[in-house]
Amino acid sequence: LEGIAFGAGPGSFTGVRLACGVAQGLACGLDLPVVAVSTLEALAFNGRAACPQAARVLACLDARMNEVYYAAYDLHEGGLRLIHGPRVTPPESLALQMFETGMLAEGSWLGCGDGFATY
């Protein structure tokens, strides 16, 4: 192993804390570096691979209690560049926020994540 990565959220508070603690414990015992990986960025990266013609990716997860976690990414030299978020918002406010920032008018979008199916 060259390092240990863990899902740093957003997500369940307890789940993120457990993932972080286990990763830190293993890394400390093995003298390895730890890398925190954004759940939304990982989701967007997988979505980008499934739909390479998209210019931008909106990752959206159900945050429970009638809210979603989201982040918007631009495809940038084979990787992702964060352009908006991560944030938590009511799902009906997400489209308004995207419209107000002018992002909807730019390029083709891919939406990925269970936030779309839930709401």
Image (cartoon, helix red, strand yellow):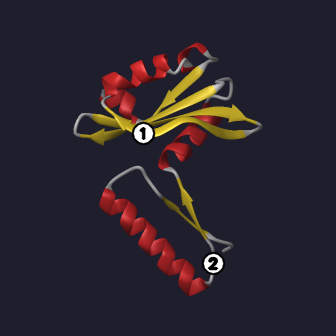
- When the figure is inspected, residue 98 is found, relative to residue 50, above or below; the finding is above
Left or right of 50 on screen, residue 39? left
- Give the residue drawn at x 44%, y 36%: 70
- Give the residue drawn at x 40%, y 19%: 96
Which quadrant of the rendered structure holds the C terminus?
top left
Disc 2, SS: loop
Q: Amino acid at mark 2?
A: Leu
Q: Which x, y percent locates residue 108?
A: 61, 18
Q: Which x, y percent locates residue 114?
A: 38, 35
Locate residue 33: give its quadrant: bottom right
Q: Determine the residue located farthest toward the left in the rendered image.
A: 65
Which quadrant of the rendered structure holds the N terminus?
bottom right
Which residue is nearer to you in this view: 83 or 20?
A: 83
The crowd level at tag 2 (other Cα within 10 Å; few <14, some 14-19, many 20+) is: some
Q: What residue did someone put label 1 on?
A: 87
Q: Determine the residue located farthest toward the right in the rendered image.
A: 77
- When the figure is inspected, residue 67 is found, relative to residue 108, above or below; the finding is below
Q: Are marks 2 and 1 in contact (CB under 8 Å)?
A: no
Q: Determine the residue located farthest toward the bottom in the rendered image.
A: 29
- Give the residue drawn at x 41%, y 20%: 95
> What mark, if any, has residue 67 been given in the picture?
none
Q: Which x, y percent locates residue 32?
A: 63, 78
Which one is closest to the eye, mark 2 or mark 1? 1
Q: CA distance from mark 2 to mark 1?
A: 31 Å
- When the figure is inspected, residue 61 is found, relative to residue 105, above or below; the finding is below
Q: Which x, y percent locates residue 5?
A: 56, 64
Q: What residue did someone put label 2 on?
A: 32
Disc 1, SS: strand
Query: Which label's residue is closer to the chain start, 2 or 1?
Result: 2
Q: Amino acid at mark 1?
A: Arg
- Give the residue drawn at x 33%, y 38%: 62
